[in-house]
Amino acid sequence: MPKVETILVPQYGTPVVGGSAGAYNPAWDCDGAFMSYKFQPNNNCYAYGCNIASNSFPQPGRRSGCLLTAADMTGTVEQVGKIVADYAVKDGLIWIGTSMADILAFKSKHPLVDLPPNGEVVVPGNALSGHFVALMISPAGTDGNWGGDYHWARCDNSMGACDSWSQKDGGDQVTNFDFAGHPIVDPSIANWTVNQGPVSKRNPAELIVSYAFYGFLFVPAGQVTII
């Protein structure tokens, strides 16, 4: 079990919590906080995935007192993915599974509804308000030049066919296409290979890394805290 402690990180602006992510609309999400004119550098793919502009470049588990370390990023995709997903669950996300069939099964058990006009997150029966996210993992490389990373994509039509997704690539703009420029229809088969460029002045070779799909989670509206 990881050591749980209070982790203090700077927040570069007041957090803005969005509602259910129901469409690809960067100007609307969290009042445009993911865009260049506001707090783009302070919100990463995890913030965008959760639709919470924490302005702290959040990490899974950190708000819950668990800190991802370099050692956590070593191992297989499955090993690293389980750590990251487990930490996200501590923040309030719900693990779904590894296929679109798992998403459909979840939706059949928990029909998705919009937030009521009064903002209450309590919904009748087994219904839930929120959206799906996908987690991709790139473990640390054996050459020492890549420390490992994770990446999140967010479903923009969770109440529908779940065939429209978007993502925020690090400090870059929010986009609804993958790293090869294709619309993200299914994150499990999208292109998540990225050219990091030369990472050492002594080695001009470009570093090419790939993220492998790990699984799907659900972000229940109003029930997730990140930092």
Image (spheres, helix red, strand yellow):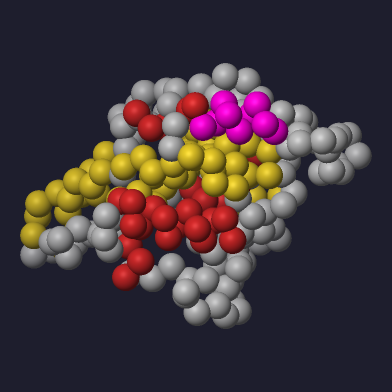
Asked if residue 92 is among those painted magenta in the image, a careful observer would answer: no
User: Where residue 178 appears, x then y in whole percent?
Assistant: 38, 31
Q: Please indicate whether residue 59 sits to the left or right of residue 32 in the image.
A: left
Rendering quarter of residue 186: top left
Looking at the image, is 33 positioned above or below residue 28?
A: below
User: Where residue 206 appears, x then y in whole percent?
Assistant: 14, 49
Question: Residue at coordinates 39% horizontally, 44% vertically from top-left?
Answer: 214
Q: Please indicate whether residue 119 sits to the left or right of residue 87 in the image.
A: right
**Residue, far top:** 161
Looking at the image, is 95 positioned above or below residue 20?
A: below
User: Where residue 65 appears, x then y in whole percent?
Assistant: 57, 73
Along the line of sight, the residue nearer the viewer: 107 or 68 = 107
**Number of marks in the image?**
0
Q: Which is the main secondary structure of the residues drawn in magenta?
A: helix
Question: Residue at coordinates 23% horizontally, 47% vertically from top-left?
Answer: 209
Q: Please indicate whether residue 138 sits to the left or right of residue 201 in the image.
A: right
Q: Please indicate whether residue 72 sits to the left or right of residue 113 in the image.
A: left
Q: Which residues are magenta?
A: 102-110
Question: Residue at coordinates 60% horizontally, 79% vertically from top-left?
Answer: 6
Along the line of sight, the residue nearer the viewer: 143 or 72 = 72
User: Where residue 197 appears, x then y in whole percent?
Assistant: 20, 49
Question: Residue at coordinates 32% horizontally, 70% vertically from top-left?
Answer: 71
Residue 19 visible here: yes
Q: Is the C terminus in the top left, top right, bottom left or bottom right quadrant? A: bottom right
Asked if residue 108 is among those painted magenta in the image, a careful observer would answer: yes
